[in-house]
Image: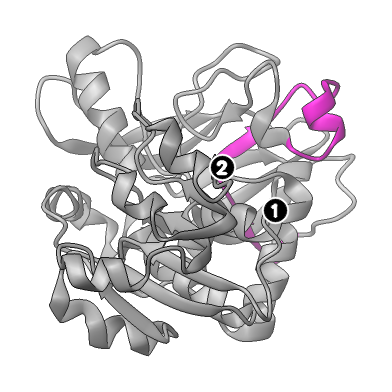
Amino acid sequence: MRTTTGWQADPSTDALRRTSLQRRDLRPDDVAVRVDYCGVCHSDLHALRAHKNDGDGILVPGHEFTGTVSEVGDAVTDFAPGDLVAVGNIVDSCGTCPMCRADQENFCREFPTLTYGGRDRRDGATTLGGYSREYVVRERFAHHLPSGLDPAGAAPLLCAGITVWEPLQALGVGPGSTVAVAGLGGLGHLAVKLAAALGATTSVISRTPDKAAEARSLGAAGFVVSTDADQMEAVRDRFDVVIDTISAPHDLTSYLRTVAMDGTLSHLGHLGPVTVNATDLLIGRKKLSSAGSGGRPSTAAMLRFCAQHNITADIELLPSSQVNTALERLDHNDVRYRFVLDMSDLD
C-alpha cells in the first residue's frame, strides 16, 4: 500500500481532519497522480452530512481535481511521469453494458465507481477522494490537461463543467440557439461561458438583480429577474434551451414557460423529486430533461473546447488547510463561483 495525506470526515464533528491515508499499489493500468488542485462541490457537503448521520466507513471528499502524474503501471501507454492530468467524479465502470459501450460510463447500468464513497470494482475497497495529496486511478479515467489551461481554474470543469457541457451538446446548442441559464453559481457561471462560446445568444435568469453585471461579464447578452413577473412574461416562449442549475427545490412552472416551442428545460441543479403540470409541457410541445456528469470522450472534448476558448471556472483558491472554512462558506453560498483547494500544503 502507498501512504499519502488528506482530509477525512470525522462523523463526531462537522469538520474534516488531516490524516494519513492508504492508496493501493499500482496495478498495471494505473497512474499515480500528485493532486495539485481539487474543487469543492455542493455534493461534498451532501456527502458529509449523510456520513455524519450514519458514520459508516471512511469518507474523503473531492471529485474534481488536476495534478501531475508521478508514476505509472507497467501496462500504461498514454501517460508518463510529469504529465498534467485531470480526474472527475467517475473512476471506473463495468465497461460492457450498453451505456458504457456508447461511451456514457456516467450512466453505467451497474452504476459507475465514484471517485469517493464508491466501491473499487476489483478489491471492494471504499474509494477515497481528491482532498488528498495523491490519488491512484485507472489510466482510462484520467484525462490529459490541455496546455494553456490554468490547472486550478480547470479543476471544476471535471464536475461542474462536464455537467453543463453534456446537455448543451446533446441539445445541439450552437450559433442561432437561444439559451437561458437559471441560477448563477458554480454550475451556472460555467453554463453561461460554454453556451456563449458555442455561439448561442445566452441569457441568465436569476432572483438577484445585482448579478446582471456579473452575468454580462461571463458572456450573457440578457438578464432576467425571476421574481419580476413582467420580465418573466417578456421572455415567455423565448428560449430553445433552459439550463436549470438551481440547487434548492423550486417550482419549474415559471421556467418551463420561458421555453420556446419544441424547446427543452434541462434540470440539473436539484436532483430530488419535482412536480410538473403536463399542460406546461403540452402547450408548445416542450420537453423536460436532465443530465449528470459525462462519459470519457465527452469529457475530453470539453477540455479541448475549453482550452481553445480559454474557459476555466472563476474560483477562490484556498490552501487545503482551510477546507472547513470553504465548506462552511459554501453552505452559505458565500463564493464566486467555486472554491478550489491548493493541496501543496499537504507535503
Q: Given the image, on which type of amino acid does mark 1 rest? A: Ala
Q: Residue at x 57, y 48 (%)?
A: 88
Q: Residue at x 66, y 30 (%)?
A: 107
- Secondary element under disc 2, as helix, strand or loop, is loop
How many other residues sit within 10 Å of disc 1, few (<14), some (14-19) or many (≥20)?
few
Q: From the image, tell me which residue sits under label 1.
A: 170
Residue 172 location (% of width, % of height): 71, 62
Task: Let me know if residue 342 appears in the view.
Answer: no
Task: Let me know if residue 31 appears in the view.
Answer: yes
Residue 142 location (% of width, % of height): 69, 50
- Quadrant for residue 29, please give it: top right
Give the answer, above or below, for where 51 lies relative to 197. Answer: above
Quick check: 4 left or right of 114?
A: left
Region in magenta: 81-104
Q: From the image, tell me which residue sits under label 2.
A: 291
How many other residues sit within 10 Å of disc 2, few (<14), some (14-19) or many (≥20)?
many
Is residue 11 or residue 338 the one in the foreground?
A: 338
Is residue 145 or residue 36 the one in the foreground?
A: 145
Quick check: 249 left or right of 80?
A: left
Give the answer, above or below, for where 90 lies relative to 123. Answer: below
Q: Residue at x 59, y 78 (%)?
A: 200
Quick check: 12 left or right of 194?
A: left
Q: Do residues under tags 1 and 2 come within 8 Å of each other at their CB atoms?
A: yes
Is residue 1 or residue 83 the one in the foreground?
A: 83
